[in-house]
Image (cartoon, rainbow, N blue to C red):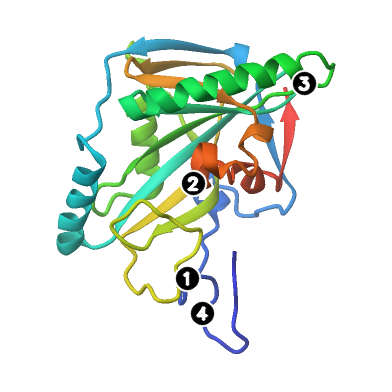
Amino acid sequence: MATQKRGAGATGWPKNSTPPSYGAKYNGNPSMALNRTISLYPLTNYTFGTKDPLFERDPSVPARFQRMREEFDKIGMRKSVEAVLLVHEHGLPHVLLLQLGTTFFKLLMQDLYQLIFITYSTYFKTNYFLHVHTIFIRGELNTDEDEVEGLKRLLTETLGRQDGVSQEWVIEDIIGNWWRPNFEPPQYPYIPSHITKPKEHKKLFLVQLGEKALFAVPKNYKLVAAPLFELYDNSQGYGPIISSLPQALCRFNFTYM
């Protein structure tokens, strides 16, 4: 979403900000083509192992917002990033979600698994069943940390292999901006007009996977497969951010390798 006032010296939104060229910054490509093509590789190209649990910093949601409130008084708005990693299966797109296996999410996941199983059973009867999987990795940036380097750090901490082999993460593009107005769960893809100091700014990035890779998944995480048609317009089941992925990704052309 971008707006520009006639005769104004600054362009972009939020006010007085200039949109960076993400392609040039991340991949060294000075020209950003309007018609973007992303390569998707089969899910079977990737190997998923396990590693020690990765625990969140806060034991509960109230504790998380209390820490956010305390940090806001010291360093201001929190900056966080989320990564979307796509693969394909049967030659078309669906989404792989990595979620922490807390009690709340376990109950949610059981419902999702049941729903997805029913959906898959129905669509496997056709020749055109497609499903794209996306890995959603999220985390907070350290103070003054570059958002791209911070995202790569979080990807390595969450899915990085443990055999000493380093993984190269290619940050392809930014696909969304979300703001948290208050110390509460609601987030929006814009800053409400009455909010002058948002409490958190979250950016969603599309990460281009290589042809093959080994990922180590923390034991306390759950890997949930959800096709794009299941996410679409389903904020009740997946929340507003994840359910907006189909719209955020529709501007790309996918090549199934």
Q: Select label 3 or label 2 by which is in front.
A: 3
The residue tagged 1 is: 14
Q: Is residue 102 visible?
A: no
Q: Is residue 62 visible?
A: yes
The residue tagged 4 is: 10
The residue tagged 2 is: 204
Q: Select label 3 or label 1 by which is in front.
A: 3
Q: Quadrant of residue 105?
A: top left
Up the image or down, 113 lies above or below 21; here it is above
The residue tagged 3 is: 129
Q: Quadrant of residue 129?
A: top right
Q: CA distance from mark 2 to mark 1?
A: 16 Å
Q: CA distance from mark 2 to mark 4?
A: 24 Å
Q: Earlier in the sequence, mark 2 or mark 1?
A: 1
Expressed as whole percent of the image width and height from the top left, the position of residue 122 reads: 74, 18
Q: CA distance from mark 4 to mark 3?
A: 47 Å
Does the residue at mark 4 contact the one at mark 1 (Cβ under 8 Å)? no
- Label 2 SS: strand
Up the image or down, 19 lies above or below 174; here it is below
Q: Select label 2 or label 4 by which is in front.
A: 2
Q: CA distance from mark 3 to mark 1?
A: 40 Å
Q: Quadrant of residue 210?
A: top right
Mark 3 Cα within 10 Å, few/some/many (few <14, many 20+)?
A: some
